[in-house]
Amino acid sequence: MQTVAQGWLALQLTNSAFQVGLVTAAQQFPVLILSLYGGVIADRHDKLRLAKAGQWLFVVQASLLWWFAWSGHMTIGWLLALATFSGLIASIEIPARQSFIVELVGREDLVDAIALNSAGFNLARIVGPSIAALVIGTLGLQWCFALNALSYIAVLGGLYMIRLPAWKAAESGTSPLEGILEGFRYVRETPLVYALIRVIAVYSIFALAYISMMPVVAQDVLHTDAAGYGLLLTFVGVGALTGALSLGLLGMRVKRGTLFIYSSYAFAVLLVIFSLVHVRWLASVVLFALGFAMLLNGSLANGLLQSIVPDELRGRVVSAYVFVSVGLAPIG
């Protein structure tokens, strides 16, 4: 809901495609700068505690978005500042949360757990835009931010219910910079990890911007309103959820490396097709397929990476994944 409202608000404030992209870039740029350091922090601190702290800060950010929009004080400058604040939190929270999954399920079930985690994320991509379109049309755009802030009650409640053995700090005599360089060396010297990281980097720069540009596509190419924009994102979410559930159901019955290759090619071809579409119903069909391929591409890359990385380097390798999948996106 916040994503839909934030993109539409940027378009309302500026009517500029560049500014809409800039808001997304502001949210992702801190991840480019700080996520590798976030990986070192994740390897050296209690990941559950880091996740809790990150979610509390997201509550503050969401509440500020609501207040500025509700009070009429929102400007593009404040929107950019709050998007940057969100990125600063995410640069530490995402590596900690992503590398934390193995502690909950174990290495054996890791790939399927990541797929199911993606299913939950993409279920929000289906429900969120639909509710956002309804809320914007009835209560006003600012209440998307308010409902998002309230939703963190459930998130934090879930985190505080987790019970794990007491966390023990691993001994490390290296500085944070040396820790980052150690992670870099592992990525560069492990062929499969290096190949996966390069593929994800290409897709982050050249492919994922289609979601950031969706408000502009909705208004200027497909000639629809906020409700139509929300519906377009819903089709992306339905496709991604279908992909996540399919991946979870297939389990180990498919060769995941081969499936990753096919999904990467499919994602590229579908993106070219989407760029040529000017009819709403056809765009919705292509977006469903795009969501499916995008989910397979991202989940398989993440799962393959985490299934081979040693535990003592997990946070740093996951942060490298976050660095390329989120941090490089502003370049696109």
Image (cartoon, rainbow, N blue to C red):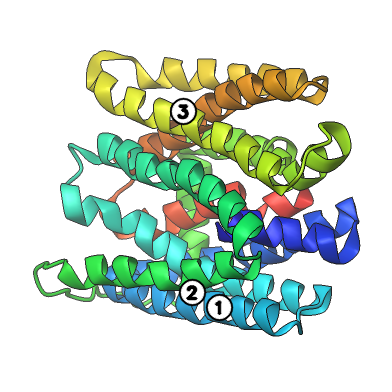
Residue type (three-letter) at the residue carrying disc 2: Phe
Q: CA distance from mark 1 to mark 2?
A: 5 Å
Dot in front, 3 or 1: 1
Which residue appears at 46% of the width and 45% of the height?
Answer: 127
Which residue appears at 45% of the width and 61% of the height?
Answer: 94
Q: Callout 1: few (<14), some (14-19), or many (20+) C-alpha neighbours within 10 Å?
A: some
Of 316 and 57, which appears nearest the observer? 57
Of 36 and 237, which appears nearest the observer? 237
Residue type (three-letter) at the residue carrying disc 1: Gln
Which residue lies under the disc numbered 2? 58
Of 119 and 129, which appears nearest the observer? 129
Q: Up-down: is 272 above or below 20?
A: above
**Disc number placed over residue 61 in the picture, else none:** 1
Residue type (three-letter) at the residue carrying disc 3: Leu
Which residue appears at 62% of the width and 76% of the height?
Answer: 65
Q: Position of residue 42 (x, y in %)?
A: 37, 68
- Horizontally, residue 272 falls left or right of residue 151, namely right
First-in-chain label (3 vs 1): 1
Q: Position of residue 281 (x, y in %)?
A: 68, 21
Q: CA distance from mark 3 to mark 1?
A: 30 Å
Q: CA distance from mark 3 to mark 2?
A: 27 Å
Question: Does any portion of residue 24 appear in the rendered image?
Answer: no
Q: Are marks 1 and 2 in contact (CB under 8 Å)?
A: yes
Q: Are marks 3 and 2 in contact (CB under 8 Å)?
A: no
Q: Secondary structure at mark 3?
A: helix
Q: Callout 3: few (<14), some (14-19), or many (20+) C-alpha neighbours within 10 Å?
A: many
Q: Are marks 3 and 1 in contact (CB under 8 Å)?
A: no
User: Which quadrant: the N terminus?
Assistant: bottom right
- Horizontally, residue 70 falls left or right of residue 102, namely right
Asked where in the image residue 138 lies, by quadrant, the reply is: bottom right
**Disc number placed over residue 296 in the picture, else none:** 3
